[in-house]
Image (cartoon, grey):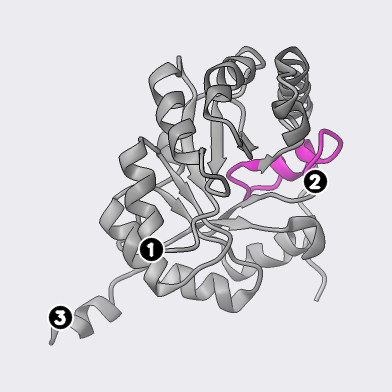
Amino acid sequence: MTGTEKDAQTPHSIRTRPQFRAVMGPAARIVAILHVEEADAAEPLLQALEAGGIGLIEVTLRTRAALDVIARMRVAARSAVIGAGTLTRPDQFALAKDAGAQFLVGPAFSTRLADAAGVAGLPFLPGATSPSEILAAVEAGFNELKFFPADLNGGLNWIRHMRPLFPEVSFCPTGGITNENLAEYLSEPNIVAVGGMFMSPRAEIEAGAWDRISAMARNAVAAASADQAAPERAPRH
C-alpha cells in the first residue's frame, strides 16, 4: 500500500490538527475580535479586556498595525490568549506566528491555507458555511471551524442542522453574536466558542474608551455565565 493510500484511509480524528480548545484556558468561551489601527492602543485595550474577564483575543490582520498589536499584547498579557484573525493568504501564517499569535482564524478554507497552517503548527480555525466546505476542512484534519457571518447564514438553526451530519465538528460563530444570544449559542454542544466585536467596537477603541470596553466585556462574560441549560433540539429536515 502506498503512502497516499494509507493517508486516504487514516481516520479524521488521527489526522486532526492542533486544537483551539488546547489553548483556550479556563476563561469564558468568548473571543474578543479586534480591529486596531494604532499599535499604541495594544496595551490599554488588552488591560481593559482582561479587566472585564476576557481571556481570548483575536486581532484581525486588517490593519498595518495588527502584527505589532499582537506582539505587544503577547508581551503585556497577564493571562489572555492572543490570536490572529482574517488570515486569507498563506504568507500571513508565518507573519502571525512570528508576531507571537497563539491561534489563527480565517474566514474561509483552502488547501493552500491548510498547508500554511500545517507549517505554522498553531491551532487554525478555517471558515465554513456549507456542508461541502465543512467536509473539505474535515478531510484536511480540521474539526474546529469558524462560522461567519453566522447571522446571515442561518445562525443557530444552521448550527443545529450541521450537528447530526458532522458530530465531530465544533464551530466558533461570529457575526451577529450579541449579549442577548451568546448564551443560547454556547448552550449548543457543537459550539466551542463565540466571537465578535460587540464588546470592543472599533469606535470605542479609537476613542480610547477603555472603561466602557471593560464594562462591555464584563457584560458579555456575565451573559455567557447565565444559565445555558436548554433542551436539545432535533433539526428539521
The residue indicated by pointer 3 is 3
Q: Range of the magenta residues?
A: 177-194
| Circle 2 residues within 10 Å: few <14, some 14–19, many ≥20 | few
Task: Residue type at mark 2: give it.
Answer: Pro
* Camera-side mark, 1 or 2: 1
- Picture coordinates of residue 232, whole percent (x, y): 76, 50
Q: In which quarter of the image is the N terminus?
A: bottom left
Q: Which residue is drawn at 36% across and 37% down?
A: 99
The residue singled out by tag 1 in the image is 90
Identify the image quadrant of the C terminus.
Answer: bottom right
Q: Is residue 80 left or right of residue 37?
A: left
Q: Is residue 94 magenta?
A: no
Residue 73 in view: yes
Mark 3 and mark 2 lie on one chain; the one further toward the N terminus is 3
Give the amino acid type for the residue marked by disc 3 in the picture.
Gly
Q: Would you say residue 228 is visible in this rendering?
A: no
Q: Residue 219 bears which disc, if any?
A: none
Residue in front for this viewpoint, 179 or 207? 207
Residue 142 appears at what percent x and percent y?
43, 61
Q: Which of 193 and 119 is in front in this view?
A: 119
Q: Nearer the viewer, residue 105 or 30?
A: 105
* Residue 220 on image: x %, y %: 75, 27
Q: Quick check: 118 left or right of 175?
A: left
- Label 3 residue SS: helix
Q: Mark 2 = which residue? A: 231
Are the two marked residues, 1 and 2, in contact with CB atoms closer than 8 angstroms? no
Q: Secondary structure of the magenta portion, mostly?
A: loop
